[in-house]
């Protein structure tokens, strides 16, 4: 008889684990406390029936694990992956400025590495930075690319993104936009606290996406998330035999010796052969009994991980307001705003039935900095949040919002108000602060029948994202396959993309690391923006590159 598995949580991680296990014949039961599955990725109707989301969905081109799963989810007459629509551009807004970043060449050798430099320089130029600042950023990223895994983990992960960029020595604009603005807007992390390893590697992935035409730089769904993806996923899982229970809150995890003996769900005990904890960190912490902590001491590291707020507000407009065919990033907004106009992508939604012409979906990534009235977002009422967000948008878009009629608005349901001016967030976002890698556990634990599938688990993705959650689930499933001695194919895992040409460079840096030598760049961007070799090793590297291209 097939082994039984209980999955705790029906977010992206939990559903991904259930999917992979069901395909391999395991009997799976999923428990979710909310009345809608999807976790932070879910969409839901407002009290008036209009579509709303925890925050808009964002599928960068470097995602590989999540698209692989989405291709196996039927959605209408196609797959959930086929419901993704590519965006065409980004807007970097500060006093109305914008720049579209497009480049058609893949980075395969030193000559084409110039394309990455060009994209970085254009990004810097689009937000008003000097060429010197753009060159500095490019060269720091090249240092990270050339670093071995040991240096990344034991040196760069212990530095903040701010320290790694030596931002204190750069221009005020560099500090404001590149060292802090982008990290706040994209991942709700502050430059002075985010791990240089995490921040730098994800920055590289986004730049690679912009530099490669062979894949989408960014995609969004063609309808609200649950309509296009999550609800069809539940239908598919149930058709495969997965038992999904909603409104089923997990209250505790019981231990007997060094094994999980059962979990309490809604006052009742449920048991299985294996358990996958796919709970967000703020919930998992409440499950850490002394017995669990003794059985798996690495779980104690969860106490040291940091969360921030990143939640959405929806503006329902009388007329469509496309703004840009993609995401707008308001780099110097006090509350770290990003936005997307939904109608141009939600092709299957009948906006007329909702009495609106369009939706402007805005994510708020900084809840602890004062707005124009001196109040931080976390201390504002819902109405004050609405007014301040609109004010900050207007400040960045000059007069483009003049005359735009807002018929209604909705703040993410996770922002809860115990009293009129003190908000709580039921679903904060994990951020990778410097040194946090040490505190993060693996998917397989020392408890033989407990696996972890959440965005705090150690993954290649190394960021609290849907991609990271999906990868963590795959690692948890692989651990179960190993534990049961299964001969089934293991779930695929993909490292982050790095140009193959840097593989020998990282091998050289591994030797330097063992000799306690500092990182030594083999290539750099000159003051003229050209890619050139650096030092003896760099010249040898360039020679190998030329020979490789001739073969």
Image (cartoon, rainbow, N blue to C red):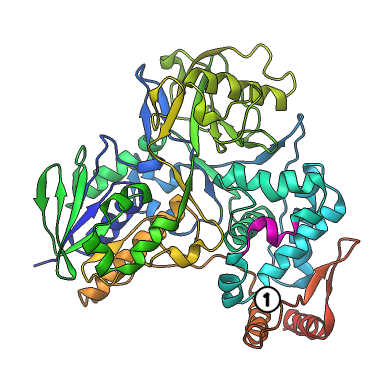
**Residue 449 visible in the shown view:** yes
Magenta span has 299?
no
User: In front: 327, or 274?
Assistant: 274
Tell whether 433 sits left or right of 533: left
Q: Quadrant of residue 51?
A: top left
Question: Badge 1 local density, few (<14 within 10 Å), some, or many (20+)?
Answer: some
User: In front: 328, or 198?
Assistant: 198
User: In front: 161, or 38?
Assistant: 161
Q: Is residue 295 above or below residue 181?
A: below
Q: Is residue 481 above or below residue 137?
A: below
Q: Residue at x 58, y 33 (%)?
A: 339
Q: Residue at x 60, y 57 (%)?
A: 199
**Residue with the most extreme front position:** 290
Q: Is residue 269 above or below residue 357?
A: below
Task: Classify mark 1: helix, strand or loop.
Answer: helix
Image coords of residue 281 (percent x, y): 37, 51
User: In front: 308, or 543?
Assistant: 308
Q: Residue at x 24, y 49 (%)?
A: 237
Tell whether 484 sits left or right of 71: left
Q: Residue at x 57, y 15 (%)?
A: 319
Q: Identify the magenta region.
A: 159-166
Tell whether 268 sits left or right of 366: left
Q: Is residue 545 above or below residue 345?
A: below
Image coords of residue 53 (percent x, y): 43, 32
**Residue with the most extreme right position:** 528
Image coords of residue 360 (percent x, y): 55, 26
* Quadrant placement of the C terminus: bottom right
Magenta span has 165?
yes
Q: Quadrant of residue 198?
A: bottom right
The residue singled out by tag 1 in the image is 501
Image coords of residue 181 (percent x, y): 67, 43
């Amino acid at each position: 008889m097939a082994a039984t598995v209980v999955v705790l949580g029906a977010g992206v991680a939990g559903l991904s684990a259930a999917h992979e296990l069901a395909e391999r014949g395991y009997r799976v039961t999923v428990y979710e406390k909310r009345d809608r599955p999807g976790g932070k990725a879910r969409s839901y109707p407002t009290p008036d029936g209009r579509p709303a989301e925890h925050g808009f969905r964002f599928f960068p081109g470097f995602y590989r694990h999540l698209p692989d799963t989405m291709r196996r989810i039927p959605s209408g007459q196609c797959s959930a992956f086929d419901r993704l629509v590519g965006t065409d551009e980004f807007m970097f807004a500060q006093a109305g400025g914008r720049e579209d970043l497009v480049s058609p060449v893949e980075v395969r050798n030193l000559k084409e590495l110039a394309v990455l430099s060009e994209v970085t320089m254009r990004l810097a130029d689009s937000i008003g930075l000097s060429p010197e600042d753009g060159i500095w950023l490019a060269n720091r990223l090249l240092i990270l690319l050339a670093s071995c895994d040991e240096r990344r983990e034991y040196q760069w992960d212990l530095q903040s993104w701010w320290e790694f960029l030596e931002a204190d020595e750069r221009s005020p604009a560099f500090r404001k936009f590149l060292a802090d603005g982008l990290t706040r807007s994209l991942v709700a992390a502050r430059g002075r606290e985010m791990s240089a390893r995490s921040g730098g590697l994800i920055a590289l992935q986004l730049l690679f996406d912009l530099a490669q035409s062979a894949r989408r730089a960014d995609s969004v769904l063609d309808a609200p998330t649950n309509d296009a993806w999550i609800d069809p996923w539940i239908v598919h899982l149930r058709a495969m035999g997965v038992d999904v229970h909603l409104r089923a809150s997990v209250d505790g995890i019981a231990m007997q010796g060094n094994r999980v003996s059962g979990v309490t769900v809604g006052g009742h005990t449920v048991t299985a052969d294996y358990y996958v904890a796919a709970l967000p960190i703020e919930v998992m912490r409440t499950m850490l009994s002394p017995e669990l902590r003794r059985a798996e001491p690495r779980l104690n590291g969860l106490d040291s991980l940091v969360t921030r707020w990143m939640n959405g507000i929806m503006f329902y407009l009388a007329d469509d307001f496309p703004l840009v065919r993609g995401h707008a990033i308001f780099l110097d907004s006090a509350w770290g705003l990003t936005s997307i106009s939904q109608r141009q992508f939600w092709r299957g939604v009948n906006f007329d039935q909702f009495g609106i012409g369009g939706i402007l979906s805005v994510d708020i990534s900084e809840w602890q900095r004062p707005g124009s009235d001196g109040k931080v977002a976390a201390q504002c009422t819902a109405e004050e949040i609405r007014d301040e967000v609109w004010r900050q948008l207007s400040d960045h878009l000059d007069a483009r919002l003049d005359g735009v009629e807002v018929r209604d608005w909705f703040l993410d349901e996770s922002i809860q108000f115990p009293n009129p001016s003190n908000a709580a967030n039921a679903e904060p976002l994990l951020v990778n602060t410097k040194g946090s890698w040490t505190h993060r556990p693996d998917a397989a634990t020392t408890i033989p029948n407990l696996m972890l599938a959440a965005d705090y688990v150690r993954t290649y993705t190394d960021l609290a994202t849907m991609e990271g959650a999906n990868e963590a689930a795959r690692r948890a499933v692989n651990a179960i396959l190993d534990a049961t001695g299964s001969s089934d194919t293991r779930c695929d895992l993909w490292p982050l993309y790095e140009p193959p040409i840097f593989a020998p460079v990282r091998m050289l840096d591994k030797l330097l690391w063992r000799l306690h030598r500092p990182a030594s760049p083999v290539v750099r961007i000159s003051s003229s923006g050209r890619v050139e070799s650096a030092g003896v090793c760099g010249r040898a590297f360039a020679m190998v590159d030329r020979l490789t291209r001739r073969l």
